[in-house]
Image (cartoon, rainbow, N blue to C red):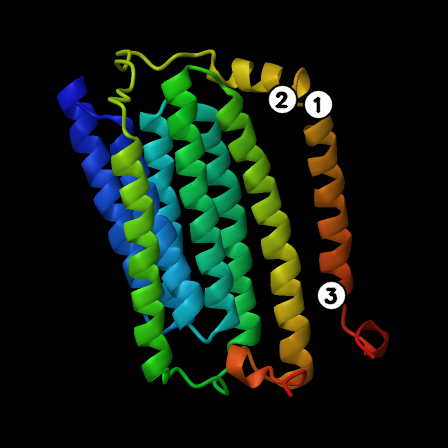
């Protein structure tokens, strides 16, 4: 019998792996992918609580999260491509123009 | 039905977590993108188990279809041979793993403390055909203002992406 903790623990696992990806990777594109993973973990949480309460509001909110994630990915990848065109790199530690 | 549900849950959960770990640890960005698609499809299966069919189909179309293709295109456009594929972050990786472990422990602790026998209602045998209708009703009646704001957000993101990706001197000078 599945309880809601199963879904919450799965969500925690995906969220933590996403945070780990953002912290450890140098490639900005993979960092953006990890952010998508984090948002996806949040969506699982929202859908699980929506099922727990028998209301559809959580699913509606997860659709808003998906819209925000799509907007973020599009603009983020546009910035990465523009940056690659100007600086010839996609590595986060080589984008140090603003560093002291 | 319950046993089948549990089996499917563990199947999709293990698939999602394993693909996510591989996504974070693979060196090649293209492999990472493929494992990202795998994770997103596995969590789409989780959405079906949660009887969120509309979210499931949006996940498959929008995430696994649209955003994944976007990532693959970005990798192919930007990730040239110039980018070294070595991960050389010794100390920072140790700190990052420690921080992520602490974060996970905190959240799991909160879940364990806060659990008050929250058991999900029993799963119906048949998939309800009214999920999309309910989501549409909620989207257009109580959530019409956030829906409009999301539409404006997507419009702004489209314009921004066109502007960012535009070739030419006036784009970034």
Task: Looking at the picture, tell me which residue is in the foreground, A20 or B132.
Answer: A20
| Same-chain check, marks 3 and 1 | yes
Q: Position of residue A98 (x, y in %)?
A: 67, 82
Task: Looking at the picture, tell me which residue is in the foreground, A73 or B33.
Answer: A73
Q: Nearer the viewer, mark 3 or mark 1?
A: 1
Q: Residue at x 34, y 73 (%)?
A: B95
Q: Is residue B56 visible?
A: no
Judging by the rendered image, the residue that carries numbered circle 3 is B164
Residue B1 picture quarter: top left
Q: Which mark is residue B144?
A: 1
Q: Is residue B127 visible?
A: yes
Q: Secondary structure at mark 3?
A: helix
- What chain does mark 2 sit on? B
Side (left or right) of A98 relative to B136: right
Side (left or right) of A27 relative to B17: right
- What chain does mark 1 sit on? B
Q: Position of residue B2 (x, y in %)?
A: 17, 19
Q: Residue at x 62, y 61 (%)?
A: A76
Name the quadrant of the C terminus of chain B.
Answer: bottom right
Badge 1 local density, few (<14 within 10 Å), some, or many (20+)? few
Q: Position of residue B10 (x, y in %)?
A: 19, 37
Badge 3 local density, few (<14 within 10 Å), some, or many (20+)? many
**Residue B107, above or below A87:** above
Seen as rendered, the residue at the extreme right is: B170
Pointers 2 and 1 in contact (C-beta within 8 Å): yes
Q: Secondary structure at mark 1?
A: helix
Q: Looking at the image, is mark 3 or mark 2 earlier in the sequence?
A: 2
Give the spatial CA distance, label 3 vs label 2: 31 Å
């Amino acid at each position: 019998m599945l309880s809601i903790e199963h879904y919450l623990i799965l969500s925690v696992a995906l969220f933590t792996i996403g945070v780990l990806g953002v912290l450890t990777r140098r490639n900005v594109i993979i960092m953006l992918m990890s952010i998508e993973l984090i948002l996806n973990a949040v969506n699982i949480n929202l859908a699980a609580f929506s099922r727990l309460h028998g209301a559809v509001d959580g699913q509606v909110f997860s659709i808003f999260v998906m819209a925000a994630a799509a907007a973020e990915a599009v603009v983020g990848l546009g910035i990465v491509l523009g940056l690659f065109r100007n600086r010839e790199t996609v590595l986060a530690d080589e984008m140090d123009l603003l560093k002291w | 039905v319950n046993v089948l549900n549990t089996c499917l849950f563990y199947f999709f959960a293990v698939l999602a977590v394993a693909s996510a770990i591989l996504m974070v640890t693979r060196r090649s960005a293209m492999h990472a993108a493929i494992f990202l698609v795998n994770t997103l499809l596995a969590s789409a299966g989780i959405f079906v188990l949660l009887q969120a069919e509309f979210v499931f189909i949006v996940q498959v179309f929008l995430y696994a279809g649209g955003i994944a293709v976007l990532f693959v295109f970005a990798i192919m456009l930007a990730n040239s041979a110039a980018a070294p594929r070595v991960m050389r972050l010794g100390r920072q990786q140790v700190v990052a793993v420690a921080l992520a472990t602490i974060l996970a422990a905190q959240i799991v602790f909160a879940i364990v403390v806060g659990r008050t026998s929250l058991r999900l209602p029993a799963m119906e045998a048949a998939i309800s055909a009214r999920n999309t209708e309910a989501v549409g009703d909620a989207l257009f009646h109580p959530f019409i203002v956030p829906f409009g704001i999301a539409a404006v957000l997507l419009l702004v993101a489209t314009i921004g992406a066109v502007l960012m990706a535009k070739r030419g001197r006036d784009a970034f000078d």
